[in-house]
Amino acid sequence: MKNRDLLTFICSCTFILSAFCTTSSATAAETPIPCISITDSSGAQQSTYAPGDSLIYTVTFPLEQQSLLLFTASVRFPDNNVDRTKLYVSLSEQEKSVCWTGTVPDDAAGRAEVVVTSLILPGKFVIARKDFEVSRSGDDRDNPSFICSACHGDNYRGWKETRHYPAVGCELCHGSGQNHITAPSSDTISIPTGDICNTCHSGNDGTVIEASNGFINAQQQRNELEDTAHGSVADCCTCHNPHYSPSNNKASAIKLTCRQCHPQKDVYLNMQSLDCEDCHMAPAVSKGDSSGSGLYKKGDTPSHLFRIKTEAAADTFLTPDGTAASKDIHGPFLTVDRACLHCHNGFDAGLQTFDSVQQTSTIVH
Ligand code: HEC
Ligand code: HEC
Ligand code: HEC
Ligand code: HEC
Ligand code: HEC
Ligand code: HEC
Ligand code: HEC
């Protein structure tokens, strides 16, 4: 990390000082002892950290006057002996602390130590140390997928942040990795096609899109996709990288975006900044956490129907008995109440009526 990056961190890490370094008021003014704090990426101090965690290291110098500061810091991890040494030069003014970030190596376990050696001018050398525990949490060590993390750290870390973690593990999709681990190569492991997703993201025989309480039921993406225009050109993995979560790492999770296949689809009516998904994947699916009522219903999960049937009458999204999504000869569709009114409800955007969104829906593009 360059000094320039470091300085930007200085401002953003003051909260950590007040939280964890309050005891280090300088009693011996000539040799102030720096305080080292270690937190996770959200700024919270943990009793142990796991391989793959991003850590923030903060060193606070209880300086009482403006001083020139030179220091090196290294983090020693036990098993693999990784030493990360940094050299920083910084003039302290208001800021009395320096932080930097690092990642716990995938194969680290045991006691790790941060050592900071600093020269404070005017003054002298001070060395401060702080150790912390790295352990594969029970969850991780026992998880059958953990063994894959040693060589596929990125996939593993991404997967850990999806809702597939911890149960839908690597081998559920890739098959047994036993031979692969003893002889790692592309020939000893299988790569599934997008069809593997249908095992769990499909209901009934895949044809009827079941609904209840005014929403499409959860975990039926295959049923939703099947009869749409996309059903014949895309499977789940055309758009999804299954190792990442769309809700917390969309850039990695969606490998092919709408715009890449539909370039130059301009949006008008003051809605240029919306995502395509806001309308075309409107939350018409519910796991049980829905809001709104009447035509302003809002589910908790994006749908996979994409087509907006602008001419459809209000509240015809589901069949009259409410047990399935309606279909016409082109397959299932969103009505404009579902596509637009989850936002135009007076909270997320101005309140509009069904008639007004229906009239303007044909001039969105
Ligand atoms: C000791 C290291 C190691 C471990 C452990 C390991 N792999 Fe691999 N894996 C490799 C190597 C090396 C390759 C080949 C990479 C290449 O060809 O680019 C590979 C390739 C793969 C591929 C891609 C094959 C392809 O054709 O691109 C998959 C999928 C895979 N591993 C899954 C797993 C899973 C699942 C586990 C855990 C059960 C696992 N690996 C454990 C080293 C490992
Ligand atoms: C939900 C099913 C699923 C799970 C769970 C899963 N994978 Fe995959 N994996 C796939 C599919 C499908 C592909 C093919 C790539 C694609 O189409 O995007 C793939 C490709 C890969 C590849 C080769 C391409 C790449 O992305 O690097 C590796 C390596 C890999 N997986 C490792 C893992 C490891 C390690 C885990 C567990 C941490 C894991 N996978 C969990 C479905 C899965
Ligand atoms: C063994 C069952 C199973 C398989 C196979 C499976 N999934 Fe899942 N998937 C689940 C479950 C369970 C959830 C969590 C549902 C929830 O909490 O809403 C989930 C959630 C997801 C999520 C949301 C993740 C998040 O964190 O936001 C995506 C995206 C997803 N699956 C895509 C896929 C894709 C793509 C495939 C095929 C490569 C696939 N799944 C295969 C069971 C599975
Ligand atoms: C045309 C591209 C495309 C296809 C094909 C596709 N998806 Fe998605 N999917 C997306 C996008 C984009 C999102 C994120 C939507 C958002 O953020 O509003 C998403 C979100 C999801 C989610 C997350 C829902 C949540 O709870 O946040 C799941 C689960 C999912 N897709 C599963 C699947 C499965 C399973 C398939 C195959 C049957 C599939 N998708 C096919 C583009 C696609
Ligand atoms: C793999 C490329 C691909 C991706 C990714 C993709 N589409 Fe499409 N889309 C198509 C094709 C092909 C068609 C059918 C031919 C056409 O109408 O252009 C289509 C059709 C559509 C239609 C018309 C549906 C109908 O039944 O008339 C809409 C709306 C649409 N896409 C929106 C989206 C949105 C929104 C996204 C992103 C979430 C997206 N597409 C992602 C390729 C793609
Ligand atoms: C404000 C809501 C909204 C947003 C945002 C939006 N669309 Fe649309 N889109 C619509 C509506 C409504 C229609 C149907 C228009 C009609 O039938 O006259 C439509 C139609 C389409 C069609 C099918 C009609 C055709 O021209 O073939 C595609 C493809 C499409 N949109 C892609 C996209 C893409 C890509 C994005 C993101 C860049 C996007 N849309 C953003 C509302 C939206
Ligand atoms: C993700 C939320 C969202 C969705 C979905 C959405 N809009 Fe909007 N819309 C906005 C915002 C935000 C504005 C600009 C400010 C405002 O009106 O609150 C806007 C503005 C508009 C305007 C201009 C109003 C004005 O007074 O300038 C029209 C018309 C409109 N939307 C129609 C639609 C239609 C039709 C759809 C569905 C096809 C739709 N919107 C879907 C958020 C949304």
Image (spheres, grey):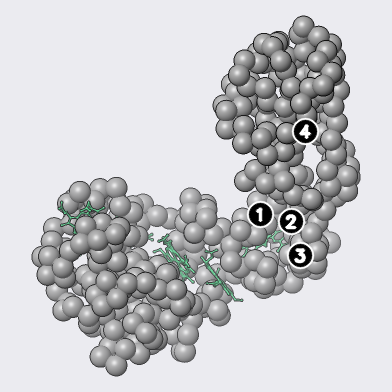
Q: Which of marks 3 and 1 is nearer the N terminus?
A: 3
Q: Residue 139, which numbered label?
A: 3
Splitting the image into 4 quarters, where does residue 289 fall?
Answer: bottom left
Instruction: Please give the name of the residue rendered at 35% of the width and 65% of the height, measured from the top-left corner.
Output: 281
Q: Mark 4 points at which residue?
A: 23
**Relative to 321, is 99 above or below?**
above
Instruction: Measure the alpha-carbon separation of dots 1 and 4.
Output: 35 Å
Q: Which residue lies furthest to the top in this view?
A: 122
Question: Label 1 sits on what residue type?
Answer: Arg
Disc number lying in front (2 or 1): 1
Q: Name the residue under label 1.
A: 157
Question: Label 4 sits on what residue type?
Answer: Thr
**Relative to 106, is 119 above or below?**
above
Instruction: Please give the name of the residue rendered at 76% of the width and 52% of the height, measured from the top-left corner.
Output: 50
Splitting the image into 4 quarters, where does residue 339 fall?
Answer: bottom left
Instruction: Measure the alpha-carbon separation of dots 3 and 4.
Output: 34 Å
Disc number lying in front (3 or 2): 3
Question: Label 2 sits on what residue type?
Answer: Ser
- Marks 3,4: beta carbons within 8 A: no
Q: What element carries label 1?
A: helix
Instruction: Measure the alpha-carbon separation of dots 2 and 1.
Output: 8 Å
Question: Label 3 sits on what residue type?
Answer: Asp
Q: Residue 248, which numbered label?
A: none
Instruction: Measure the alpha-carbon separation of dots 4 and 2.
Output: 39 Å
- Say few, some or many: other residues with alpha carbon within 10 Å of mark 1 (under 14 / 14 to 19 / 20 or more): some
Q: Does the residue labelled 3 lie within 8 Å of ligand 2?
A: no
Q: Does the residue labelled 2 lie within 8 Å of ligand 2?
A: yes
- Marks 2,1: beta carbons within 8 A: yes
Q: Mark 2 points at which residue?
A: 149
**Relative to 18, is 352 above or below?**
below
- Say few, some or many: other residues with alpha carbon within 10 Å of mark 3 (under 14 / 14 to 19 / 20 or more): few
Report the side of 227 relative to 96 (left or right).
left
